[in-house]
Image (cartoon, grey):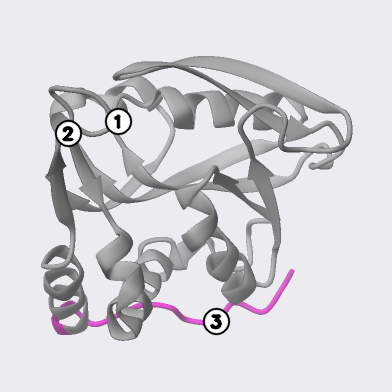
């Protein structure tokens, strides 16, 4: 078993980091289609202190998993932004779950429904080893369609999803309920 660094934050640190990160989330009406209120994380990424705070919050939320997971699966594309540094911090491998036509070797595919359309995710067929314990990472939990598709890909490759981790959750879209009984960690709710 790997050595497990302690990523826990104090309540005061967590509250300050959440406040700082939340203040930078931008609401963009009618994107990518009319009636959708898009939560834009790029202002968080632009500010080094906010990006560091967001990463610390992610690690704090899954501190109990340090040393017990084998891979991070990051969902294209914003799941890559936090998934890679989380994988690095935890000392585990990173696996991208990508849109069609982006992976060069043999893939497994999973279709899913979005709140504003349909999508397909692909993972390399050799991306996981049977029994790998996986943490799914994406920026936003809406209906749960994308995360559910990523979880099904992990399972099809013989892995076990131990938790899913999101910067933002939109609770009114009930994605958490659709992912049950999967453990869901979301840092902010809008």
Q: Name the spot of residue 181 as percent of width and height, x first.
A: 40, 27
Label 3: few (<14), some (14–19) or many (≥20) C-alpha neighbours in 10 Å: few
161 vs 167, left or right, is right
SS label for mark 1: helix
SS label for mark 3: loop
Q: Name the spot of residue 74 as percent of width and height, x first.
A: 57, 48
Q: Which mark is residue 5?
A: 3
As rendered, which of 132 and 49 lies closer to the eye? 49
Image: magenta residue range: 1-12
Q: Disc 3, disc 1: CB below 8 Å?
A: no
The first of marks 3 and 1 along the sequence is 3
Residue 141 image-quadrant placement: top left
Whole-number angstrom distance, CA of label 2 to CA of label 1: 7 Å
Q: Which mark is residue 176?
A: 1
SS label for mark 2: helix
Label 2: few (<14), some (14–19) or many (≥20) C-alpha neighbours in 10 Å: some
Main structural element of the magenta stretch: helix, strand or loop?
loop
Label 1: few (<14), some (14–19) or many (≥20) C-alpha neighbours in 10 Å: many
Q: Is residue 141 visible?
A: yes
Q: Which mark is residue 171?
A: 2
């Amino acid at each position: 078993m790997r050595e497990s660094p302690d990523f826990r934050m104090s309540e005061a640190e967590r509250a300050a980091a959440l406040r700082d990160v939340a203040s930078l989330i931008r609401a963009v009406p009618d994107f990518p289609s009319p009636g959708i209120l898009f939560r834009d994380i790029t202002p968080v990424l632009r500010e080094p202190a906010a990006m560091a705070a967001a990463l610390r919050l992610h690690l704090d939320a899954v501190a109990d998993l340090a040393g017990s997971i084998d891979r991070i699966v990051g969902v294209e594309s914003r799941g890559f932004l936090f998934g890679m540094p989380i994988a690095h911090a935890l000392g585990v491998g990173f696996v991208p779950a990508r849109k069609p036509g982006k992976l060069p070797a043999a893939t497994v595919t999973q279709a899913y429904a979005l709140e504003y359309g349909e999508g397909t995710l692909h993972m390399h067929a050799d991306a996981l080893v049977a029994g790998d314990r996986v943490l799914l990472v994406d920026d936003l939990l809406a209906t749960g369609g994308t995360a559910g598709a990523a979880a099904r890909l992990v399972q099809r490759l013989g892995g076990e999803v131990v938790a899913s981790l999101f910067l933002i959750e939109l609770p009114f879209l009930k994605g958490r309920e659709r992912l049950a009984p999967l453990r869901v960690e979301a840092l902010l709710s809008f």
